[in-house]
Image (cartoon, rainbow, N blue to C red):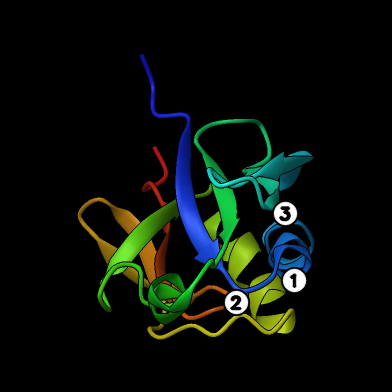
Amino acid sequence: MHLDLVSLIVPDYDEAIRFFVDVLGFELAEDSPSQTNDGRPKRWVVVRPAGGGTGLLLARADGERQERAVGDQFAGRVGLFLRVDDFDACVDPMRAAGVRFLSEPRTEPYGRVAVFLDLVGNRWDLLSQHPA
């Protein structure tokens, strides 16, 4: 058993795809036409970190309640954690692509970490383990 997908509410599919694929280096795993439970058209859009792992289902906000949740899905806390092999090699390209970091990289007992915002303002940890 494993956790396959986590939904992330976004205002626009294509803008979110560009951020996750072009900026963070995720792979577009699926982009298929679909329908809401009441028959309206939508898309089933899944991005995954390169090499697999748990994916993000990019879900376009549908209605006022979901629109209010865009960028605040985790009530201002870090809610997503992106683990990378080479922390330092990721930070500069992310900054150059316009990713906003809320903290400078630091070393914790569990590894290197810095908090950044995704395209709509959700907080993420960029993480790597200490070198062996």
- Mark 2 = which residue? 119
**Secondary structure state at the residue bearing disc 3:** loop
Spatial CA distance of label 1 from label 2 is 8 Å
Quarter occupied by residue 35? top right
Circle 2 Cα neighbour tier, 10 Å, few/some/many (<14 / 14–19 / ≥20): some
Q: Position of residue 116 (x, y in %)?
A: 46, 75
**Left or right, 37 with reference to 15:** left
Circle 1 Cα neighbour tier, 10 Å, few/some/many (<14 / 14–19 / ≥20): few
Q: Is residue 87 above or below residue 92?
A: above
> Circles 1 and 2: CB distance less than 8 Å?
yes
Amino acid type assigned to the residue bearing label 2 in the image? Leu
Amino acid type assigned to the residue bearing label 1 in the image? Glu
Of the image marks 1 and 3, the number of the one nearer the N terminus: 1
- Mark 1 = which residue? 15
Q: Can residue 83 be seen here? A: yes
Q: Position of residue 61 (x, y in %)?
A: 54, 67
From the viewer's perspective, is the residue at label 2 or at label 3 nearer? Answer: 2
Instruction: Name the foreground residue: 114 vs 6.
Output: 6
Q: Position of residue 129 (x, y in %)?
A: 38, 46
- Mark 3 = which residue? 25
Task: Check the picture and name the quadrant holding the C terminus.
Answer: top left
> Circles 2 and 3: CB distance less than 8 Å?
no
Q: What's the residue at 49%, 58% (across, down)? A: 8
Amino acid type assigned to the residue bearing label 3 in the image? Gly
**Secondary structure state at the residue bearing disc 2:** loop
**Secondary structure state at the residue bearing disc 1:** helix
Spatial CA distance of label 1 from label 3 is 14 Å
Of the image marks 2 and 3, the number of the one nearer the N terminus: 3
